[in-house]
Image: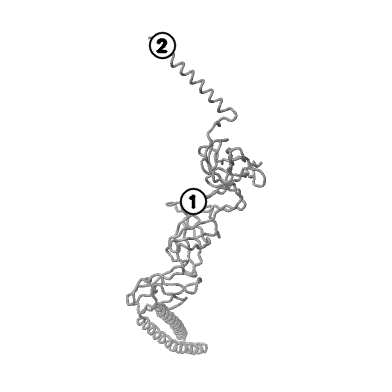
């Protein structure tokens, strides 16, 4: 029992001595010349700048020819000639292929012969019609003199009307044969296959050859594809987050692994009015001048679109932004470089490197590294190489004195 009491008394005395020692140390810490209340935190800082800032978004896509179509015959036949090959340049209305035309030439000759027969029938029909007309006139004269009976006049009138109707049929047959001849001639012309297009460049290029010379083709079987590559279309898929930021006429910077040392400029010419439900993206097309043919259809591309830009903005490094009590802000360095203060800010344009500060107006330097250990009023230590770092007990004066950082709150 005595031993327990002695242990309790010893512990009480030990606690009393410890408490007194703690109070003495605390007084020394708070006394002038004593150690600071909080340990200084080593940080890195950067100046607040007045400069231009842009918000640039990155997208991916591919290149497509500005125009592309397939050349195919309008009639069936054997491909007798193929005058172009993969990669060849072709001019507008250039002959690129020909079908065996013997069958179509024969059809034209038959149509011409039938037209001759139909035209010959016109002379015969006109002669018969003239005879029927004279007979009708003679019968009418005799009837007026009461010489010919009424029935004979009726027969003459019926015969004339019949001949007149047959003559009209003969004339219609001539028109029919003329149309048949024109159709046969058109089908014959279709055996000459040309590269025809409207608008765009005068010279284009063969992108694909689908058949070889000598094959039998049906109508609309593809022969070759023709591409316009003097201008290319950059096809970009834009997410719903950026859809409202993209506008017609915006400039696009294009880069590709096929030309790693070059950057190309395109202009947005078309924006899809709707997003795809499967991917929540919209198709955006930008036109690229490709007169030197450095770019090819099908290449994968990276596209950068500047969606916002401001000159003379107040800008801090993106690393300077931090959060305290659910408020976004920066730690602003005091003029003597010993302490920092947390300043809530309103940001504008933010990109991968910098952030625009809309309010309040900042001047001076902000912490870019180490702010996760800071609180408002925390002491800091700057790197030895920092030009704004001041040795202990010294202040900067004169022409080399650093401008005092300020925080101006907008009304």
Percent position (x, y) of residue 183?
A: 42, 78
- Circle 2 is placed at which residue position? 5
The residue nearer to you, when weighing 309 against 377, is 377
- Circle 1 is placed at which residue position? 240
Q: Is residue 151 visible?
A: no
Q: Give the secondary structure at mark 1.
A: helix
Q: Which mark is residue 316?
A: none
Q: Is residue 175 visible?
A: yes
Q: Nearer the viewer, mark 1 or mark 2?
A: 2
On screen, residue 360 above or below 189: above
Q: Quarter of the image holding residue 379?
A: top right
Percent position (x, y) of residue 21?
A: 51, 22
| Crowd tier of the residue under label 2, counting other residues whose Cα lies within 10 Å: few below 14, some 14–19, many 20 or above | few
Q: Residue at x 55, y 60 (%)?
A: 249
Percent position (x, y) of residue 394?
A: 62, 39
Percent position (x, y) of residue 100?
A: 35, 80
Look at the image and tell me in which quarter the C terminus lies: top right
């Amino acid at each position: 029992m005595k031993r327990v009491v002695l242990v309790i008394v010893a512990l009480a005395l030990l606690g009393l001595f410890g408490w007194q020692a703690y109070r003495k140390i605390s007084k020394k810490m708070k006394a002038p010349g004593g150690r600071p209340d909080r340990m200084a935190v080593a940080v890195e800082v950067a100046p607040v700048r007045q400069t231009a800032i842009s918000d640039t978004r990155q997208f991916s896509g591919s290149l497509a020819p500005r125009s592309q179509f397939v050349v195919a015959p309008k009639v069936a036949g054997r491909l007798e000639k193929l005058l172009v090959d993969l990669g060849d340049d072709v001019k507008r209305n250039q002959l690129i292929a020909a079908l065996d035309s013997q069958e179509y030439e024969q059809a034209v000759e038959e149509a011409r012969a039938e037209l001759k027969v139909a035209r010959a029938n016109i002379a015969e029909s006109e002669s018969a019609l003239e005879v029927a007309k004279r007979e009708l006139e003679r019968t009418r004269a005799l009837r007026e003199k009461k010489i010919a009976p009424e029935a004979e006049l009726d027969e003459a009138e019926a015969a004339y009307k019949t001949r007149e109707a047959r003559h009209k049929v003969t004339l219609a047959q001539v028109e029919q044969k003329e149309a048949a001849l024109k159709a046969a001639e058109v089908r014959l012309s279709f055996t000459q296959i040309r590269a025809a297009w409207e608008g765009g460049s005068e010279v284009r290029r063969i992108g694909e050859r689908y058949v070889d010379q000598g094959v039998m083709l049906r109508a609309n079987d593809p022969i070759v594809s023709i591409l316009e590559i003097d201008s290319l279309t950059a096809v970009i898929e834009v997410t719903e987050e950026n859809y409202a930021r993209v506008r017609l006429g915006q400039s696009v910077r294009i880069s590709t692994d096929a030309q790693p040392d070059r950057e190309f400029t395109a202009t947005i010419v078309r924006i899809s009015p709707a997003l795809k439900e499967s991917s929540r993206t919209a198709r955006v097309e930008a036109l690229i001048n490709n007169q030197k043919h450095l770019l090819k259809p099908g290449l994968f591309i990276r596209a950068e679109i500047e969606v916002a830009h401001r000159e003379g903005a107040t800008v801090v490094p993106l690393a300077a932004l931090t959060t305290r009590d659910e408020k976004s802000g920066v730690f602003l360095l005091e003029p003597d470089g010993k302490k920092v203060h947390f300043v809530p800010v309103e940001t504008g344009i933010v990109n991968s490197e910098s952030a625009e500060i809309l309010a309040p107006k900042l001047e001076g330097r902000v912490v870019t590294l180490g702010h996760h250990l800071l609180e408002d009023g925390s002491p800091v230590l700057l790197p030895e190489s920092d030009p704004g770092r001041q040795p202990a007990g010294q202040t900067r004066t004169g022409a080399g004195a650093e401008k005092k950082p300020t925080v101006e709150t907008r009304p």
